[in-house]
Amino acid sequence: MKLRDEIQTLLASYSTPDEAAAVISEEMARIDHNREAPGIAVGERAPDFRLPNSVGEEVWLEERLRRGPVVVSFFRGAWCPVCNLQLRALHRALPELREAGGSLVGIHPDMALFGNVEVSPDFDMVCDPKQSVIHDYRLQFTVPARVRQIYTSAFNTDISSYNADGSWRLPVPGTFVIDQDGIVRRRHVTADFTRRMEPEEVIEALEELRGQVA
């Protein structure tokens, strides 16, 4: 099953009021339209970073790139069901991703441990406590007031209590395939958190890079 189908099945299982869903959709579309968090572009150099994983080991992008292309994916947090679906889908695809020569780094602003794949030679989940990397990748936005009210009242979710910096700022979900020169070769960025890059597309991009090297 495609990740998008898993997401639609998940969303259909919730009883989100139509009015609330419409407000969230409208605000996310506005963020995209106004390019508040457009993400770095294909052809740009990906900002380097050093962030700790769940056991305090430093994950350094530059060092990872010495071994091969890197997929950098940004998640809203462990509280986000869609993020957890994407995480599991990427974890299932890890053998193929590894075979295509790549490794994965997931970045999130959440204080909580995220998933069960934080420590792996090919898949690290790291926290960006000050959201400096999220900002550098031009993914950061502040949750709009109308959406904030829905999250706290309808979903009983106070994002500021999860974020390491105590803010209502989040990354829009973004995935970047970065070649060994540090250049973004493919990306998927949208404020619509129900849409994510399919693992198959990630693997396809890595295989293309491997073919170029060969």
Image: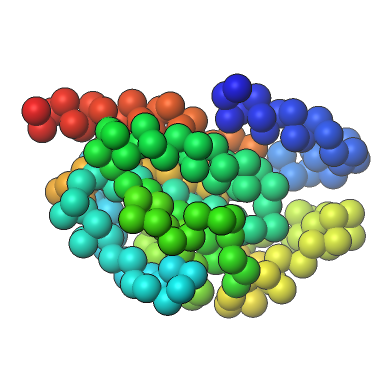
| Vertical relation: 100 (above or below) 178 | above
Instruction: Please indicate whether residue 70 sits to the left or right of residue 116 in the image.
Output: left
Q: In the picture, residue 63 is in which quadrant? A: bottom left
Instruction: Please indicate whether residue 147 sits to the left or right of residue 54 in the image.
Output: right
Q: In the picture, residue 188 is in which quadrant? A: top left
- Name the residue located 62 percent from the left edge and 68 percent from the top edge: 112
Residue 52's spot in the image, x, y percent? 41, 72
Instruction: Please indicate whether residue 203 sits to the left or right of residue 101 in the image.
Output: right
Residue 66's spot in the image, x, y percent? 16, 54
User: Front-most of 206 and 128?
Assistant: 206
The residue most toward the left is 214
- Name the residue located 65 percent from the left edge and 25 percent from the top edge: 5
**Does residue 23 appear anywhere in the picture?**
yes
Instruction: Please indicate whether residue 207 sits to the left or right of residue 54 in the image.
Output: left
Which of the image's four quarters has the C terminus? top left
Residue 24's spot in the image, x, y percent? 74, 45
